[in-house]
Amino acid sequence: MKETKIKLSEEELLLVQNAAVILTKNAIIQKAISLFGMLADDMKAMLEKASLPEDVKMATPKISRGENYKGLPYAILDYPRLFTHENIFAIRTMFWWGNYFSITLHLKGNYKDMYQAAVNKNISLLAEKQFNICISPDQWRHELQDDNYISLSRVTEKEILALIQKNQFLKLSAKVEFAHWDDSAIILMGLFTQIIQVLAAH
């Protein structure tokens, strides 16, 4: 066999010999999943009392994880979660390694038609909570980057209405930095509550 040219840098060599790195990563992701489990219980209790369609309320929370969203590990809580080809009503809470937690309202089809007026009416409340609106045509991108989302506080009411009408879907998302990990469950639940209150007032 020829001498291999697949060599490791000094940093890579240190990492590959350090099992604690992966074990610590796994422990952190498990803590994120446990946090999502507690959130799901609180969200379910709130949703049961909310004035929302019964088919939306009937769905059960789903927690999933993966290793490669844009090359990085992630965990997701989908609740509520109603996905069909034509219609979507979902709130996705996401842990994205190296980045942040995010919580995203995703509406499409009948549900977008049903709630876009309520969203537009309550834009100022959502802007105060630092929500962003999706400007990309790709509804399955989750990262809060400038080519995908824009802050509600940076656009006019007319521009927001145009954005809502432009795509077949409507996505609003806010993030929680990992620096606030200890309070993240309370913050995420507060953002979830704000979403539900806006929708229930339609």
Image (cartoon, helix red, strand yellow):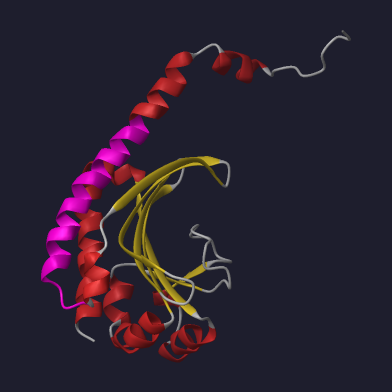
Looking at the figure, which quarter contains the C terminus?
bottom left
Q: Position of residue 83 (x, y in %)?
A: 41, 67
Q: Main secondary structure of the magenta part?
A: helix
User: What residue sits 45% from the left and 21% below the top?
Assistant: 21
Horizontal side of 32 relative to 151 (left or right) equals left
- The residue closer to the viewer here, 155 or 91, is 91
Residue nearer the viewer, 165 or 8: 165
Looking at this view, name the residue that lies furthest to the bottom.
Answer: 158
Q: Splitting the image into 4 quarters, where does residue 156 fall?
A: bottom left
Task: Using the rendered image of the protein, determine whether residue 199 is visible from the camera's viewpoint.
Answer: yes
Task: Determine the residue located farthest toward the right in the rendered image.
Answer: 2
Q: Residue at x 74, y 17 (%)?
A: 7
Residue 47 in the image: state x and y as whole percent.
17, 66
Identified at 22% across, 72% down, the residue is: 196
Identify the residue at image location x=42%, y=16%.
20
Q: Is residue 195 visible?
A: no
Does residue 51 show up magenta in the picture? yes
Residue 71 in magenta stretch: no
Quadrant in the rendering for residue 51: bottom left
Residue placed most toward the observer, 166 or 13: 166
Q: Is residue 96 above or below residue 173?
A: above
90 lies above or below 26:
below
Q: Is 44 drawn above or below residue 114 in the view shown?
A: above
Residue 36 coordinates in the image, percent (x, y): 27, 46
Position of 51 compared to 6: left or right?
left
Residue 115 picture location, percent across and down: 32, 84
- Which segment did they paint magenta? 28-52
What number of labels is visible?
A: 0
Image quarter in which the N terminus is found:
top right
